[in-house]
Every structure is written in structure tokens, then in C-alpha cells.
Amino acid sequence: MRIVSLLPAATEIVAALGAGGQLVGVSHECDFPPEVRSLPRVTRTRIDTSLPSGAIDRAVTAARQAGVPTVEVDGPLVARLRPDVLIGQALCEVCAAGEGDLAAVVTALIPVPWVVTLHAHTLEGIFADIAKVGEALELRDEAEELVAGLRYRLRRVGAQYTAPRPKPRVLVLEWLDPPYVAGHWVPELVALAGGEDVAGKPGEPSYRRSWAELAELAPDLVVVALCGFDVARARAELGLVDAADAHGVLGRRIGFVDGNAYTSRPGPRVVDAAEWLAQLMDG
């Protein structure tokens, strides 16, 4: 079976199911497990990700206003790779190809592959997507086993990593310029790790808030987990924040999680994110 993945979470799910060797093409952002980095890249971004986060936000806004996708799929390359299964998403069109782009590519493919569209907004949605991929790859038992293992680890997070204490008030920032509060499955991870998410809404998209509004929430811990950025990049971005009213938030206890690897990808490593969050809360 030949598999093409258009997003990192899908690539990680395929690998976790033991089918990584069947991947023949991945997105420009796929970097885990490490062996996928040598595979053909079937997407590319119009955004210069080396820019500061404020400039990236402005570029994304400009692309949206112009009706231009931020991520493009190399249709001819996908056709040459002749996938039996093509995995895309319907969650965010900023970091990965959207449903419209996926549909356009599929119509040009002969034969037409089995298309799997992931659209998780919650932990249960992530588990459902894993089952969906397992169905497409004829790995149903492996998917059930993987989900069972992830559920077990999540049940263990609080007891294993969190000492008895009051629930800390936690604010998770997905972006800094402008500030965005992490949503979707992240508030669930905070709760499982033993904290109270003071701004995120389970199952709801990430959303923008002003620094003044965030300061009023009085979090005990601010977790910087930037979408698409590792910890080193997140630290650099934090150093660039010069908003006059940001100190009320950033003057509090700060912790970092690799948002690119753990909190922004609706795949198996969200459990690692819960474990990291629990350790941060324990201080």
C-alpha cells in the first residue's frame, strides 16, 4: 500500500500504526519519526516561517484577504507517487492543505485513492481519527491497541507526575504576536495534567485575546507552546515581545512546551504534551 500524508499528525499516526514504511510522500512540515524527512515533500508554504511571529501573522492575513492558500499541494508529484491512500485534514488551512485543495488534487488522480480526512478538535476526535486511519490501512487491531495505550498513559498522567496540590491556574499561549490562547484538545490536556485552563475552551478553536484581558485572568503558570515552533524558537519569539501591557502576563511563571511537536499536532504525541504539562505544573 502506498500512502501520501498531507500533514504531520497523519504521518505520525501512520508510523505509530507500524505502516511508516508504506509512506511515499509527506508534507513540508513532516519531521517525525526522523526517517520520514528523506521522503518526497508534496506540499509547500507561501509563508516565510523564518520571519518573526508578528510578520507571519500579517502574511497569513494578507493571503486570506487575497483568497490565496498559504499551503500548496504539488499535484503532479502526488500523481507520480500513485498513492492508494491520501490523508488530509479539515482543521486548519494555515499550516496544512485544506479540504478544497485536497479535493482538487484528488479529482486529477487516476486511479482515485482512498481519501482520509482528519478533523479532530478534541482528544476523542484524535482517537477517532486514529481509528479512521487504521480502517483505511487495514490496521484496525493496531489502531485499537494504539488508542488503548494512549488512553492508559493519559489516565496515568496525573497520578504519575503530579504531587498533591491545589490546581494551578494555567494559561497556554499558542501564538505571541498577536497573543492567541490554545484551544481544541489543549484545555483537556491541562485538566488531565492536574491544572485549570483559565482561557482555553475544550473543543473550540484557538482565539485571540489582548494582553490586558489575559492579565486579568491571573494565571499561576503561563505555558508558551507556539504552533509550529520548538522551544528554542519560542524563547526567541518571547524575547521579541515588546507590547507595553504584556508584562502582566509574561511577568508570571513561564514554562515552555514544544508546540510544533506536541500540542499543535492531533496525533499520538499529544499524550507526551500532557506529561510535559504535568511536569511544568509540579514546578
Image: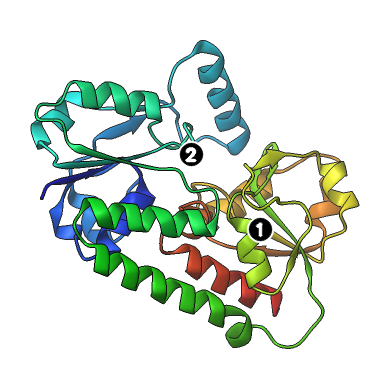
Q: Determine whether, in the image, residue 203 is placed left or right of residue 19.
A: right
**Who's the residue at 29% across and 53% down the image?**
133
Check disc 2 and give the amino acid type: Leu
Residue at 20% from the left image edge and 54% from the top image edge: 137
- Label placed on residue 187: 1
Alpha-carbon span between mark 1 and mark 2: 17 Å
Is residue 145 placed above or below 59 in the rendered structure? below
Using the rendered image of the protein, determine whether residue 8 is visible from the camera's viewpoint.
yes
Across and down, in percent, residue 43 comes to 29, 33
Name which of mark 1 and mark 2 comes first in the sequence: 2
**Quarter of the figure with residue 47:** top left
Which one is nearer the viewer's eye here, 249 or 73?
73
Number of numbered discs on residues: 2
Circle 1: element type: helix
Where residue 91 is drawn, which disc sits there? 2
- Depth check: give the residue in front, 262 or 90: 90
